[in-house]
Amino acid sequence: MNNMRPAAAAASASAASRTFARTGRAVGKTLLYALLIAVAVFQLLPLVWLFLFSLKNNQEIFRLPPLVPPERLRWENYADVWTRGKIDVYFLNSVIVTALSVLLTVLLASFVTFALTRMNWKWRAPVLGLFMVGYMIPIHSALIPLFVLYRNIHLIDNPLSLILTYTAFNLPLTIMIMLGFYYALPREIEEAAVMDGCSVHRLFLQIILPMTTSVMATAAIINMIFNWNEFVFVNTFISSDTRKTLTVGIQNFVGQYTTNWGAIGATLMISIVPVLLAYLFMSNRIIEGIAAGAVKG
Amino acid sequence: MSSKFVIALYVLPSLLLILSIVYVPILFTGYYGFFDWSGAGAMRFAGLDNYGKLMRDAHFWDSALHSLWFALMSTLSLIGYLLAALVLSGKLRGANLLRKIYLVPMLLSSVAIAQLWLKVYHPTTGILNSLLDFAGVQNTPNWLSDPDIVLWAIFAPILWQYAGFYILIYYAALKNIPEPIIEAARIDGASPLAIAWRIKVPLIGEVIKLTVVLAVVGSLKYFDLIYIMTEGGPDRASEVMASYMYAKAFRTFDFGYASSIGFTLLLICLVATWAIRALTASRDKIEYNG
């Protein structure tokens, strides 16, 4: 009995220190939680504010505190800029340029990734390296010669200059996203198909492509976001107002309407809503694409 | 149909595209750098004049210094992102939702971000000064026209934009660590801090290196936000290499000199990538089968 006592005391002391440690950890955890939530608020607050002032007129913006909604939501700001601010034209241009670039990029990247992972050829390693290094090249180092090139072949002010440039600059990332998926694809089906005398093209078009729809979707959505948001190339290659895409279009629009906050807010909201909607429905795919592209680099 | 022809069919279209739109133009940038050229009319060979001028151009060195400042700040901010990811990747309720919220600004165009933050920083009506007013601050700063704070004012939206991106990368890498490794450390009595610092961080070392490269190179070529928010001003206080090059090319039409800046920018980015990789090369490689 006697020799149990020190052990019991030690046990109760360690129990006390354990409770102490546990409370300490709980407090720490609550603080961390509060900090992480504060960061989330910081990430969303400017956007909430933007949405609110896109529904106000100037008097309301100056009179009301920033995060108080107006008595009446002025959706007419949106209708106004859509037609009178030519946002409809910019929007359509963005849709066309984005869609065609995404289609071309995903298709070409699928071809290349297929050849890189399923065929044996001498120049495979250097070609792969060429595509990977392309990811690191700053666009400004190619901008002036590209401008001169497009001017010489009369593609300045032509959406084709954007489509070709977006495709070329996004191929590295798109191939990076696809490589891992292609490597992981089981080869048994292909081997069986080849045994049955299936040609390379039929193998690619009828067997491989249908199996890679999920990675194509991931690559497509990432490309969509990049192309939709691109600014420098449009700003440099496109001069007529009717051919500009949303980013440069709203930049011009804002320059003209500097004092009309409601109109500017509505324009910015129109430009970001498509991407936010895509994120709402496909956040996992977008996250996966961003992580895959970055981590495999 | 020979197999060479088949391979060419699959590879050549992309290869020609990336060569003609990425690789050949960067060589031409280097080439134009040897000429005196306004973009139209005759090109006059100038030898190394442009590069010599660049070396003595105080405005260029200032812009390079600002780019370097952004690179340094972006790299330092990685520490915060790593800590956030370490906390989020532990068993924390709502981690997935938080991670998704953090990423939202990353999805927006730089034009939208720049225009939004121009409004945030508006001296009287902006939300920042409104909140400061409300908190009783007397002389609220004029964020974007004060040369002493303009770099910080531009760095805030950069943090805002990229936080979610880096947290996501670290989070994905941390989730890839096989659970048995962490479990074994826990059984051996390692504290959560020790597990994070001694096991998790070294295991994602390669990814950390990659993010340093991305942060440094991304900062060195940073352009859009600065071009839209300040055009490098006030009085060049926020000029960076890319905005300086753009102004030389498309404002003063000095294509030759702008090309020498563009080529120098490329060399600096490549050297930075190589240097970070070389400096952080680990002799003992950590491997596990995950």
Image (tube, rainbow, N blue to C red):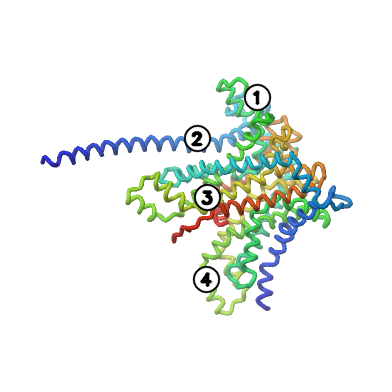
Amino acid type at mark 4: Arg
Residues tagged 2 and 1 counted as in contact (Cβ below 8 A): no
Instruction: Give neighbour class at mark 4: few <14, some 14-19, many 20+ (Cα, 10 Å).
Output: few
Give the distance between the C-alpha atoms of the residues marked 4 and 3, in whole angstroms: 33 Å
The 10 Å Cα crowd at callout 3, few under 14, some 14 to 19, many 20 or more, is: many
Residue sitting nearer the eye, B240 or B99: B240
Secondary structure beneath dot 1 equals helix
Indicate the chain on which mark 1 is placed.
A
Residue at 44% x, 37% y: name it: A32
The amino acid type of the residue labelled 3 equals Ile
Q: Which residue carries the number 4 mark?
A: A187
Question: Which quadrant, please, contains the N terminus of chain B?
Answer: bottom right
- The chain ID associated with circle 4 is A
- Secondary element at image label 3: helix
Residue that badge 2 annotates: A38
Q: Residues within 10 Å of mark 2 (few under 14, many from 20)?
A: few
Q: Amino acid at mark 1?
A: Phe
Q: Earlier in the sequence, mark 2 or mark 4?
A: 2
Quadrant hosting residue A29: top left
Q: Position of residue B245 (x, y in %)?
A: 75, 45
Q: Position of residue A111 (x, y in %)?
A: 64, 66
Rendered residue at 52%/50% (across/down): B208
Q: Nearer the viewer, mark 2 or mark 3?
A: 3
Q: Earlier in the sequence, mark 1 or mark 4?
A: 1
Left or right of A290, for residue B231: right
Looking at the rendered image, the disc whose residue lies closer to the viewer, 1 or 3, is: 3
